[in-house]
Amino acid sequence: MTRTALVIGIGAGDPGHITVGAIEAMRAADALFVLDKPNAGTLTGIRQEIVDRYAPGVPVVLVPDPPRDRSAERGASRPDGAYTAHVSDWHDARAAALATAIVEHVLEGGSAGFLVWGDPSLYDSTLRVLERVAATVPLVPRVIPGITSVQALTAAHAILLNRVGEPIHITTGRRLHEDDGRNTVVMLDADCTFRATAEPTDHIYWGAYLGTPDEILIDGPVGEVGERIVRARAEARERHGWIMDVYLLRRP
Ligand SMILES: C[S@@+](CC[C@H](N)C(=O)[O-])C[C@H]1O[C@@H](n2cnc3c(N)ncnc32)[C@H](O)[C@@H]1O
């Protein structure tokens, strides 16, 4: 008999982002699994707060996330094939750790819940990892969508994501140099890559710790606010020990 994998988007940091569907799914799960990253204290705390508030009593199982060799993935010179292979090995290790935990905590026919930051469709590996888990432990996935950090960013700045009739591109700091920069959301950028790619007149809408009490928002032309963002990011990262930030670049 198979188990159900409830892949639950929990929003990007604000417990108010949780949907009614997410609450129902959390309550329906026999256990909720969280891949526990090193230095993810605050994030794990926010997830625990969400469970305490909306699904008290449902056990939370922290699965230690297998270590990832960050040195192996940085740098534009790194060939994409090698990057993909590295991520694939890491996903295999995560799948093995999760398979063990699921069998231990959820009976056949039961439901395993996965709390996913933001929405499971956006730069998140949960669905990919669960596909690998399903090779050894049969699982049927059901996705409950969540509010993404991109939506949290546009809401915080009270702006539209796209301009009239224009496309929008979502990319990572690592790939930003390939983008035309007209209307681009940038995620996973530890290096403030906009400094190397943006024109001084490009408008940047930047947000960190969106939806949390520590939220920081800055916007303006890159030439005017770029260095302020770099400083604010470094200071906040130093103070909190971690940072999550996302930005929209818009060419006038
Ligand atoms: C691994 S991705 C996960 C994205 C997530 N699935 C979503 O729907 O937003 C992590 C990146 O999302 C962005 N992010 C997530 N939560 C954020 C928040 N509360 N504030 C700012 N950026 C956030 C950052 O760019 C971070 O590097």
Image (cartoon, grey):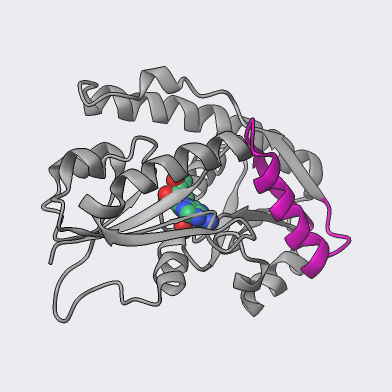
Residue 124 in sight from this viewpoint: no
Residue situated in front as seen by the camera: 117 or 231: 231
Please identify the quadrant where the C terminus is shown: bottom left
Residue located at (52% from left, 47% from top): 126
Residue located at (83% from left, 59% from top): 58
Please say if 158 is above or below 243. Answer: below
Image coords of residue 186 (percent x, y): 31, 51
Image coords of residue 104 (percent x, y): 79, 39
Is residue 73 covered in magenta?
Answer: no
Magenta span of residues = 30-59
Residue situated in front as seen by the camera: 25 or 242: 242
Residue situated in front as seen by the camera: 132 or 235: 235
Is residue 41 covered in magenta?
Answer: yes
Image coords of residue 36 (percent x, y): 67, 37
Residue situated in front as seen by the camera: 101 or 211: 211
Residue located at (73% from left, 62% from top): 50
Residue located at (74% from left, 40% from top): 62
Q: Which of the 4 quarters of the picture holds residue 77?
A: top left
